[in-house]
Amino acid sequence: MGFDTTFNAFNISSTGLTAERLRMEVVANNIANANVTRTPQGGPYRRKDVVFETALNRSSIFQGGPSNITSGLSGVNVVGTVEDQSELPRVYNPGHPDADLDGYVTMPNVNLPIEMVNLITATRAYEANLKAAQSFTDMTQQAIALLKGQ
């Protein structure tokens, strides 16, 4: 077992921490822009989602053959953020500066209850990755203490 595989669990957790932190930032940005009807690009704000993909360590997969497929896992990568293309709701508000001739304002497609669920889910996933990294650190410290004979 090489040095790289020894810390693989910690590396997987760290990629999860990074990805979930970004997801929490994107959700917070969605919540902050829930009522923005005019963006610099024009039109109302469109909510954003983060896209993840599984990260594979291809060299580990091919060294051990098919039975070594699980050691090829190396966490998660953030592919990027995408705009949600769902329909933008229209609200009747004739006094609003962005109202059309009929008095309707096109609002952002941000649904606060959904954003709060996404925020809680990202927070729980972050906490789980943090706990896994802490457990790995504790086990490593115990192993070192055993090797020292303490």
Image: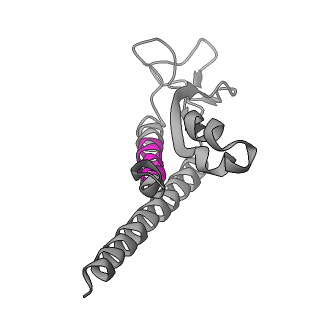
Point out the stretch of residues depicted in magenta. Answer: 11-24
Q: Is residue 34 above or below residue 116?
A: above
Q: Quadrant of residue 146?
A: bottom left
Is 84 placed left or right of 23 in the picture? right
Q: Is residue 140 above or below residue 84?
A: below
Image quadrant in which the C terminus is located: bottom left
Q: Is residue 23 magenta?
A: yes
Residue 51 seen anywhere in this rendered image of the structure: no
Choose between 113 and 118: the one closer to the eye: 118
| Residue ranking furthest to the bottom | 150
Q: Is residue 148 above or below residue 72?
A: below
Q: Main SS of the magenta segment?
A: helix
Q: Position of residue 24 (x, y in %)?
A: 44, 47
Q: Is residue 83 above or below residue 61?
A: above
Q: Position of residue 139 (x, y in %)?
A: 39, 74
Is 127 placed left or right of 94 in the picture? left
Which residue appears at 41% of the width and 63% of the height? 133
Q: Position of residue 125 (x, y in %)?
A: 52, 58
Choose between 113 and 49: the one closer to the eye: 49
Which residue appears at 68% of the width and 46% of the height? 69
Which residue appears at 44% of the width and 19% of the height? 38
